[in-house]
Amino acid sequence: MAKIIVITSGKGGVGKTTTSAAIAAGLAKRGFKTAVVDFDIGLRNLDLIMGCERRVVYDFINVIRGEANLKQALIKDKRIDNLFILPASQTRDKDALTKEGVDQVLQELQTEFDYIICDSPAGIERGAHLAMYFADVAIVVTNPEVSSVRDSDRMLGLLASKSRRAEQGLEPIKEHLLLTRYSLTRVQKGEMLGVDDILEILAIPLLGVIPESQAVLRASNAGVPITLLDELTDAGQAYLDSVARLLGEDIPHRFVKPEKKGFLSRLFKSREETIA
Amino acid sequence: MTKTTRDTSNTSFQLKGGLFTLTVIYLFNPELTVLGEQLAKLVKQTPKFFQNMPVVIDLHKLQPPSATLDFTSLIQCLREHGLIPIGVRSGNALQHEAAASIGLAIMPNTKTEATAEPATIKPTVATDAAPAAPAVVLTKIITQPIRSGQQIYARNSDLVVLGPVSPGAELIADGNIHIYGALRGRALAGVSGNQSARIFCQTLEAELVSIAGHYWISEDLHNSAMKENVHIYLEKERLHVSTY
Ligand SMILES: Nc1ncnc2c1ncn2[C@@H]1O[C@H](COP(=O)(O)OP(=O)(O)OP(=O)(O)O)[C@@H](O)[C@H]1O
Ligand SMILES: [Mg+2]
């Protein structure tokens, strides 16, 4: 049975969709049959980031309404086996997303796939709630700024109280923190919160730190998940490391504030400069 | 046949009990110009805190007690400073009539209030939350971090939290509050009037702490050098912070 992973944040524009595409592609690369589902009804853009916007025929809402079956709506990625996209509807009203409908679609997906990645919309309303409701694992995407940390904290509270697992008294959702758009130079200048500060407030395990990177924009303009880009980028590498950690591998964190000065900090510094 | 997820019944509303902590403004003097000036000064210091804050007007410290109050001007004065008066507590029948006639609620008098005037509190003894209750009320224990937007209320008991309390989270207890972690949100102990209630925490970075309605906001707390392993208690109607 597939594991359901929600990519959520509360705050908008922090990198949820970028992360959904990168992690889904990363898992598929590892040979896991993976579906990535866009819950952002009315504002779909996962299909753009995945580069399949011209192949959308049916969408998530069509399946919920019984106007199409899952096989018709799932779009197979052309670059890599095992990767499928279930796009959101651009036209329908958000209310078309129902708990029963989502449950049914996820259950059907679960029999076919190893991982289901749910790309949550921003906010804490219906779409965001349904994206996380059935999850087994949550990746909380956070930017190193106070408002994003606050919203992530709020979302963690909801994961612990308003999810299916919480309501049914099952084992709680496994929570991971993914820091994105992290700029070491700005952290060192004191313009952004550091990893330690954020971990102290959110108090959940760190899945990875994704550096602020031009490559992300390039990848999304090209419609390629950053983990499928031919060139090895800093952000792509950080996402692949995060996928490995998600699979239980123990890998040291990169792009994090160096604890000791010296060789490491010089290394980090030069990396940062190449990014900027 | 359409599926609907909303549990819409044919009633248009539902009544439920809700618990609120309200700020009480004790009126000493029926003279409103003085009140206006002093409020303006206070609001200037902490403008955000008073924005749209609901308040209850308490009359039991009013001198002379049976003074005729111009409630219309009083309400106007409070509103001008961002407060939202919702009701009146204490006072006599005439005052109540005047208040009710312009739409203020008459709030019940809570027992602990009027008696707590003299400063005869023993600061070193942390007493139980509900001294009058014969049955033992078990302490409420939360073993998870309290996140922004969450509110925990320990009715008639102490509250123990094993973990951090985030900014934007709120702890409320009729008794003491113990936090084995950092307090970054709000903590209100002794909310039903217990002046001997205390707050204990390992790191104090709170947005607000309050004991029996006496509160400090984070600005006041910044002045305190004590941040680690502190307890907060009320003595002579003033909050004190010390280490434990
Ligand atoms: N590591 C990064 N470095 C630089 N830019 C990034 C990074 N991650 C995301 N971005 C950019 O941030 C913007 C928002 O990203 P994305 O759409 O993934 O966020 P989102 O959380 O899904 O937004 P929404 O809440 O609107 O759904 C995009 O322009 C994206 O290219
Ligand atoms: Mg998005």
Image (tube, grey):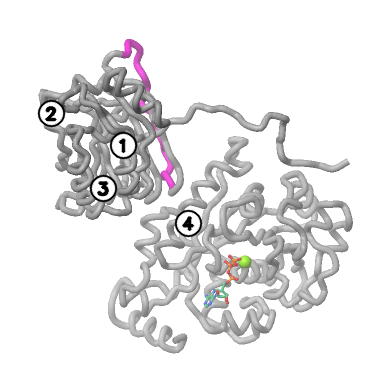
Asked if the residue at tag 4 contacts the one at tag 3, i.e. Cβ–Cβ closer than 8 Å, the answer is no
**Horizontal and vertical percent position of residue B161:** 36, 38
Q: Is residue B38 magenta?
A: no
Residue A86 horizontal side relative to residue B208, left or right:
right
Quick check: do tags 1 and 3 share a chain? Answer: yes
What distance separates the C-alpha of mark 1 from that of mark 3? Answer: 13 Å
Front in this rendered view, residue B210 or B164: B210
**Horizontal and vertical percent position of residue A2:** 71, 53
Quadrant in which residue A267 is drawn: bottom left
The residue under label 4 is which amino acid type?
Asp
- What's the magenta bit mostly, secondary-structure-wise? loop
- Residue density around tag 4, few if under 14, some if 14–19, many if 20 or more, within 10 Å: many
**Horizontal and vertical percent position of residue B108:** 35, 21
Quadrant in which residue A60 is drawn: bottom right
Q: Is mark 4 on a helix, strand or loop?
A: helix
Is the shortest distance between ligand 1 and the CB of mark 4 under 8 Å? no
Point out the tag, 1 or 3, that comes first from the N-terminus: 1
| Mark 3 or mark 2, whichever is nearer to me | 3
| Mark 4 or mark 2, whichever is nearer to me | 4
What distance separates the C-alpha of mark 1 from that of mark 2? Answer: 27 Å
Chain letter behind tag 4: A
The range drawn in magenta is: B133-147
What distance separates the C-alpha of mark 4 from that of mark 2? Answer: 40 Å
Task: Name the residue beneath numbered marker 3.
Answer: B217
- Residue density around tag 2, few if under 14, some if 14–19, many if 20 or more, within 10 Å: few
Task: Name the residue beneath numbered marker 1.
Answer: B23
Vertical order, B233 against A248 (above or below): above
Vertical order, A240 against B200 (above or below): below
Q: What element carries label 2?
A: loop
Asked if the residue at tag 2 contacts the one at tag 3, i.e. Cβ–Cβ closer than 8 Å, the answer is no
